[in-house]
Image (cartoon, rainbow, N blue to C red):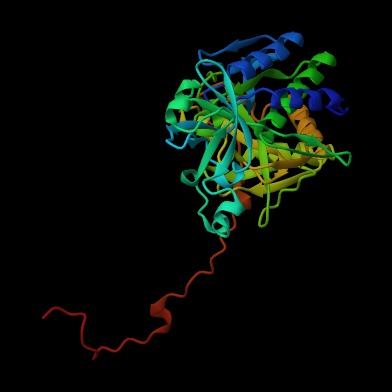
């Protein structure tokens, strides 16, 4: 693994834009699953799909076990109609966890039983000419926004006549922009930028006719934004799972928009010690721009996999990005670093050969600290009897 693995950045960027063009809020992911399956077929990579559309592909290795999975999620945030309002507008609830302040002003499509309707998400009070300073003092919440659909609708009956119903799914326009200086701005870079990076890493393996040391399963999930994610499509041969997702560049964080982040812990707990340090070692060895970080209000496909009862090592890496779950921004350098680290990991040896068995003896088990490294930091306390005088005339301590 001493040589570099070239990858097709133009393919990465074009794939990302194509993914962004496909609406895919949680629960509305058939089209994006079909697209991803088509990309795998074009690369002659075999795959299987679950009933709902999660995808498990296979890159055959020199040995089948201990296999590894590399996962990115196809689903995005969105919204759903919760109320047909008497004023001819729609009350909505979010799909996934995001703030209504980032929905305000967004153009969107409502997917009805009969077709599609365009609209705009607006605060309840929108016109300064009508409400004056009240537009700046109204609260910000999902109860204080509504959707104005682009049909003639003055009441609930008009909306229903246009085919709009409670439970209709909404997808907000991504509005991507790729700047000449390398910045990429869009909704839903989480996680379509990482999906594109994973597909690009797969393409690098296929184009280079490379054979990984062990079987690798690129995994594309469809419910990460609501928490279940990689709870399906795994099997017992998978010993390691690497999640690819957005990484959070913000005050108090160590992530940078120009690098890949190796996450040490999120709100579900620490990631696997050995797998995480393996990724750090790869990044250092091959001069991949990277940061280490800890995310307090974050969970990923890795958490869903472990919570579902899978005994696997998990780790998380991500492209550094600003304003997650809003108008996200990253940089070409972050996507390139993510793709390189993913490809090198894909072609690396497993953390422990013993992991090919779910259960085994102590032989070959990993070691974080040797006994010689276990230094007891506490200073021994002196024995009180050695320095406190005893007074035989003192009262107390004896039974009456």
Residue reaching furthest to the bottom: 393
Q: Is residue 220 above or below residue 286?
A: above
What residue sits 57% from the left and 27% below the top? 151
Quarter occupied by residue 368: top right
Asked if residue 221 lies left or right of residue 289, the reply is: left
Asked if residue 275 lies left or right of residue 15, the reply is: left
The reply to whether residue 127 is visible in this rendering is yes
Q: Is residue 270 above or below residue 7?
A: below
What residue sits 64% from the left and 29% below the top? 352
What residue sits 54% from the left and 69% below the top? 379
Q: Position of residue 21 (x, y in %)?
A: 70, 24
Residue reaching furthest to the left: 400
- Closer to the camera, 200 or 120? 120
- Closer to the camera, 150 or 16? 150
Quarter occupied by residue 364: top right
Quarter occupied by residue 392: bottom left
Q: Position of residue 261 (x, y in %)?
A: 71, 42
Q: Is residue 322 above or below residue 78?
A: below
Q: Quadrant of the C terminus?
A: bottom left
Q: Quadrant of the N terminus?
A: top right
- Closer to the camera, 379 or 74? 74
What residue sits 56% from the left and 35% below the top? 148
The reply to whether residue 167 is visible in this rendering is no
Q: Position of residue 20 (x, y in %)?
A: 70, 27
């Amino acid at each position: 693994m001493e040589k570099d693995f070239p990858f097709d950045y133009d393919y990465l960027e074009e794939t990302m834009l194509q993914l962004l063009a496909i609406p895919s809020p949680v629960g509305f992911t058939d089209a994006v699953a079909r697209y991803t399956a088509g990309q795998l077929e074009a690369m002659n990579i075999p795959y299987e799909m679950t009933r709902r559309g999660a995808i498990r592909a296979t890159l055959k290795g020199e040995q089948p076990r201990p296999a590894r999975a590399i996962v990115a999620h196809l689903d995005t945030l969105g919204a759903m109609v919760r109320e047909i309002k008497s004023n001819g507008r729609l009350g909505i609830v979010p799909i996934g966890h995001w703030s209504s302040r980032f929905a305000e002003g967004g153009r969107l499509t409502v997917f009805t039983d009969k077709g599609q309707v365009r609209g705009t998400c607006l605060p309840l009070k929108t016109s300064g000419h009508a409400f004056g300073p009240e537009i700046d003092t109204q609260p910000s919440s999902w109860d204080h926004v509504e959707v104005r659909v682009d049909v003639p609708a003055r009441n609930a009956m008009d909306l229903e006549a246009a085919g709009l119903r409670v439970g209709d799914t909404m997808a907000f326009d991504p509005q991507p922009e790729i700047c000449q200086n390398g910045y990429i701005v869009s909704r839903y870079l989480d996680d379509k930028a990482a999906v594109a990076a994973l597909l690009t890493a797969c393409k690098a393996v296929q184009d280079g006719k490379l054979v990984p040391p062990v079987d690798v399963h690129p995994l594309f999930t469809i419910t990460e934004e609501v928490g279940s994610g990689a709870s399906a499509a795994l099997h017992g041969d998978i010993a390691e799972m690497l999640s690819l997702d957005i990484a959070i560049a913000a005050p108090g964080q160590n992530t940078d928009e120009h690098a890949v982040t190796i996450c040490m812990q999120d709100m579900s707990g620490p990631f696997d010690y050995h797998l995480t340090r393996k990724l750090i070692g790869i990044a250092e060895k091959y001069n991949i721009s990277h940061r280490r970080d800890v995310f307090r209000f974050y969970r990923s496909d890795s958490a869903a996999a472990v919570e579902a009862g899978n005994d696997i090592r998990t780790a998380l890496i991500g492209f550094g990005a600003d304003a997650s779950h809003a108008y996200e921004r990253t940089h070409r350098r972050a996507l390139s670093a993510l793709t390189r680290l993913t490809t090198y990991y894909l072609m690396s040896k497993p953390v422990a050969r013993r992991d090919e068995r779910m259960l085994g003896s102590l032989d070959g088990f990993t070691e974080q600290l040797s006994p010689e490294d276990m230094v007891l930091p506490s200073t021994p306390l002196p024995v009180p009897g050695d320095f406190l005088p005893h007074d035989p005339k003192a009262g107390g301590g004896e039974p009456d």
